[in-house]
């Protein structure tokens, strides 16, 4: 009887306790993505947890009452919410964290091929989220990079408006562009490959400045840009972003995800861009901006596997039809000598994927492939090119005590063919390589990274690229990093220099071009300052030095009718210092400021000369202020560039030999008061700058693009005539910035979580 009474009492207490406690659960998201590893703390208690891979958390055995729940996650502002637990049943509470935009604590992979917090990485990596790029919406990632310190989109053709990306003043071929860590944007498509990637599918962009060839091989000489797309699991159910400008440029970004099966999820993205208005504000009878119609489709799959092993695969197809030239041009004139036009058809396909092998050891198989077909007419010059690239890589990741090892083997096959006289037969190149890297933790405050790579190019032979890095964390707010390494680039000239194909210049290659090689060192310093009132300041400064040997230079000056290419008989140097400052005030004011001082020069036979189209100073800024009561966000973005040396055609050429100081500034207003919607609009190029200012013309001899009325002497030099008072030929290479005047824009975003 006594035992029965005890059991009854215990059962009653247990039932009463169950009625008094509950479970709080929900999801933690940020910028529409579910956040893994977020910390969730029930303040005033010892109950803590972290979110799983789907962003889900659960706190059990919570007594009735009022609580404050605090959620923190790297790269996001902390969030505290008061919650009342009044019912003895599960309580659901979701959290939407706001990006803190200082980017100092993001998780990065580009520096070491491992996922690591940015401040813990021995290699400096800059991270930019979609929030940053929304401050100045653009129809392509190529244009979006203009507000990143030390990174400049460079136009290389005044008619077709193709270009590349300069990092720290180095030309585009020295920058390796990756998608999800794969070298998918090859040299031929560097000009076009950054167009058509749906911005709505971009998770973040990581930038490494300085050689990274010890991990990534050829082309990572001056730096790399890694475009990381969203994981289908974390992406919103549907997202749409549509905007247009007063130039009638229309861009449509659509993203949606599906779950075809219980163990798979797919993300579909579509980008469509159309600009079909002939504008000629500088009155030279040539289009100011290339007309274009482009469509790109991106599809990424993620599969659930045992033990959370990774398996993702993605594909993208892109087609673009673009033209620029005489405002009277029509497709019937394509390739003829009646009306001048530059018409480019581009077809491109890409496949990328990663598969973690089913072994106890962490073995990752990554692969990519792309085909690029280009059919171009530059007046009567025909350029038809076909490039195929396949890439396969296997990496082994292992921690042994203080050693964090990474080793891998890779192979890259390149096929290239075109119809130019310089390509007598299709070029087929194999580039197998092997690499190893070891991050050694010397103490809680210091670590050293040692890495090396060996590649064998089927044309140029063996190439060895070592690197070393050291990181010292003085405290949680002060970090120093020293990096040194080498880089190399195997050159395919015509895929990278549109000046070789446009205008009337002949291409001359003096000798067999040798691979370019570089040696680099940089010192990086990070300082975080947290004030008691919620103000945060992050300062990052990097001093860098790169020395090139075998650098290929283009000679525009020896003969105005030729572009002469050769390896430099000497060396080239790129050096300088770059600083980024992030400031967040509790009032809602945020600033991202950057400046870079550059000293780039080619040294040949003891003579130092600054390269064309290289600035000595650049600065960028982004200032944002949120008016919470009005649900209104104000963004003011801009950049400024110092003068650059420009290619002239003769001593009589009346155009300025240097560009002026110039700045492109933009302002945007975003209203977010409607559920799931954002309405935005603003003005681009507030100062109404165009390169035509203070120049009589940009395109030389636009009135005679086929040089029918140009006369030459017996030595091939252009003669001065009444019809040609400056002794010029038709040329489109005098270009350094966009040629669009001030314009408005308006857009709408919709996101369904």
Image: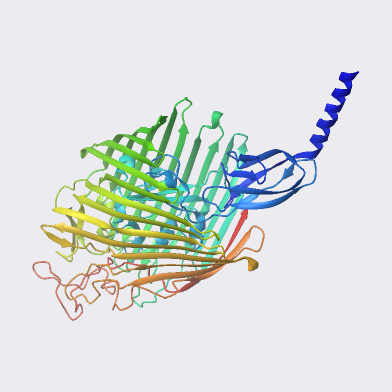
Query: Measured along the vertical axis of the image, is residue 368 above or below residue 684?
Result: above
Most extreme residue toward the front, as rendered? 2
Most extreme residue toward the left, as rendered? 714
Query: Measured along the vertical axis of the image, is residue 115 above or below residue 546?
Result: above
What residue is drawn where x is 54% and y is 52%?
76
The image position of residue 200, as x and y in percent, is 53, 53
- Foreground residue among 284 and 485: 485
- Foreground residue among 186 and 549: 549
- Foreground residue among 532 and 678: 532
Q: How is the model colour-coded? A: rainbow
Query: Measured along the vertical axis of the image, is residue 231 above or below residue 209?
Result: above
Quadrant of the rendering where the N terminus is positioned: top right
Q: Quadrant of residue 734?
A: bottom left
Whether residue 175 is visible here, answered yes or no, is no
- Foreground residue among 421 and 613: 613
What residue is drawn where x is 30% and y is 40%?
214
The image position of residue 158, as x and y in percent, is 32, 66
Numbered marks: total = 0
Whether residue 102 is visible here, answered yes or no, is yes
Q: Is residue 246 left or right of residue 578?
A: right
Q: Is residue 325 left or right of residue 592?
A: left
Q: Quadrant of residue 673?
A: bottom right
Most extreme residue toward the bottom, as rendered? 722
The image position of residue 496, as x and y in percent, is 29, 53
The image position of residue 68, as x and y in percent, is 68, 50
């Amino acid at each position: 009887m006594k035992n029965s009474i005890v059991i009854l009492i215990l059962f009653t207490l247990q039932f009463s306790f169950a009625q008094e406690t509950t479970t709080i659960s929900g999801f933690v998201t940020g910028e529409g993505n579910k956040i893994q590893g977020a910390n969730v703390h029930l303040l005033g208690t010892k109950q803590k947890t972290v979110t799983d891979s789907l962003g889900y958390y659960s706190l059990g055995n919570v007594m009735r009452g009022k609580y404050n729940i605090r959620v923190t996650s790297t790269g996001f502002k902390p969030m505290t919410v008061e919650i009342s637990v009044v019912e003895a049943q599960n309580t659901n509470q979701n959290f939407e964290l706001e990006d803190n935009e200082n980017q100092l604590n993001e998780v990065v992979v580009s520096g070491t091929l491992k996922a690591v917090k940015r401040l813990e990485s021995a290699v400096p990596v800059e991270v930019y989220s979609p929030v940053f790029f929304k401050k100045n919406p653009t129809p392509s990632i190529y244009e979006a990079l203009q507000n990143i310190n030390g990174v400049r989109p460079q136009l290389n053709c005044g008619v077709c408006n193709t270009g590349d990306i300069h990092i720290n003043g180095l030309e585009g071929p020295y920058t390796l562009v990756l998608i999800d860590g794969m070298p998918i944007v090859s040299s031929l498509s560097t000009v076009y490959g950054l167009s058509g990637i749906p911005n709505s599918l971009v998770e973040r962009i990581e930038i490494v400045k300085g050689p990274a060839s010890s991990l990534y091989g050829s082309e990572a000489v001056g730096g790399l840009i890694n475009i990381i797309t969203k994981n289908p699991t974390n992406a919103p159910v549907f997202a749409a972003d549509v905007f247009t400008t007063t130039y009638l440029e229309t861009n449509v970004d659509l993203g949606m995800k599906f779950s075809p099966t219980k163990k798979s999820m797919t993300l579909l993205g579509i980008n469509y861009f159309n600009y079909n208005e002939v504008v000629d504000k500088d009155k030279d009878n040539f289009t100011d901006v290339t007309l274009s119609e482009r469509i790109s489709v991106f599809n990424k799959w993620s599969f659930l596997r045992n033990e959370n092993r990774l398996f993702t695969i993605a594909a993208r197809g892109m087609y673009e039809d673009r033209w620029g030239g005489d405002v009277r041009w029509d497709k019937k004139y394509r390739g003829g000598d009646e009306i001048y036009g530059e018409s480019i058809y581009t077809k491109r396909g890409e496949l990328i994927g990663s598969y973690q092998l089913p072994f106890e050891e962490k073995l990752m198989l990554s692969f990519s492939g792309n085909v690029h077909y280009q059919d171009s007419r530059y007046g009567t010059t025909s350029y038809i090119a076909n490039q195929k690239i396949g890439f396969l890589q296997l990496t082994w990741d292992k921690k042994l005590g203080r050693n964090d090892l990474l080793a891998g083997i890779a192979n890259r096959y390149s096929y290239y063919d075109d119809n130019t006289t310089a390509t007598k037969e299709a070029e087929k190149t194999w580039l197998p390589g092997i690499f190893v890297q070891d991050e050694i933790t010397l103490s809680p405050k210091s670590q050293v990274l040692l890495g090396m790579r060996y590649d064998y190019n089927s044309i140029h032979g063996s190439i060895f690229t070592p690197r070393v890095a050291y990181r010292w964390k003085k405290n949680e707010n002060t970090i120093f990093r020293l990096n040194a390494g080498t880089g190399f680039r195997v050159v395919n000239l015509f895929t990278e220099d549109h000046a070789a194909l446009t205008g009337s210049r002949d291409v001359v290659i003096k000798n067999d071009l040798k691979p370019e090689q570089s040696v680099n060192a940089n010192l990086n310093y990070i300082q975080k300052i947290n004030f008691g009132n919620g103000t945060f300041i992050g300062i990052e400064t990097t001093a860098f030095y790169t020395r090139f040997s075998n650098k290929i230079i283009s000679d525009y000056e020896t003969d105005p009718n030729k572009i002469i290419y050769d390896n430099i008989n000497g060396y080239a140097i790129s050096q300088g210092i770059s600083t980024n400052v992030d400031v967040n005030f509790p009032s809602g004011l945020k600033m991202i400021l950057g400046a870079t001082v550059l000293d780039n020069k080619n040294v040949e036979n003891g003579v130092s000369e600054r390269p064309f189209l290289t600035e000595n100073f650049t600065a960028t800024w982004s200032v944002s202020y949120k008016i919470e009561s009005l649900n209104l966000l104000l963004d003011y973005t801009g950049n400024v560039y110092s003068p650059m040396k420009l290619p002239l055609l003769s001593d009589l050429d009346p155009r300025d030999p240097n560009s002026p100081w110039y700045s492109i500034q933009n302002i945007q207003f975003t209203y977010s008061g409607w559920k799931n919607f954002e309405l935005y609009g603003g003005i681009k190029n507030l100062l109404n700058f165009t390169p035509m200012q203070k120049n009589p013309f940009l395109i030389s001899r636009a009135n005679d693009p086929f040089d029918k009325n140009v006369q030459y002497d017996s030595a091939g030099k252009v003669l001065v005539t009444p019809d040609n008072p400056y002794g010029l030929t038709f040329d489109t290479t005098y270009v350094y910035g966009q040629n669009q005047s001030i314009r408005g824009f308006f857009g709408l975003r919709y996101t369904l979580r």
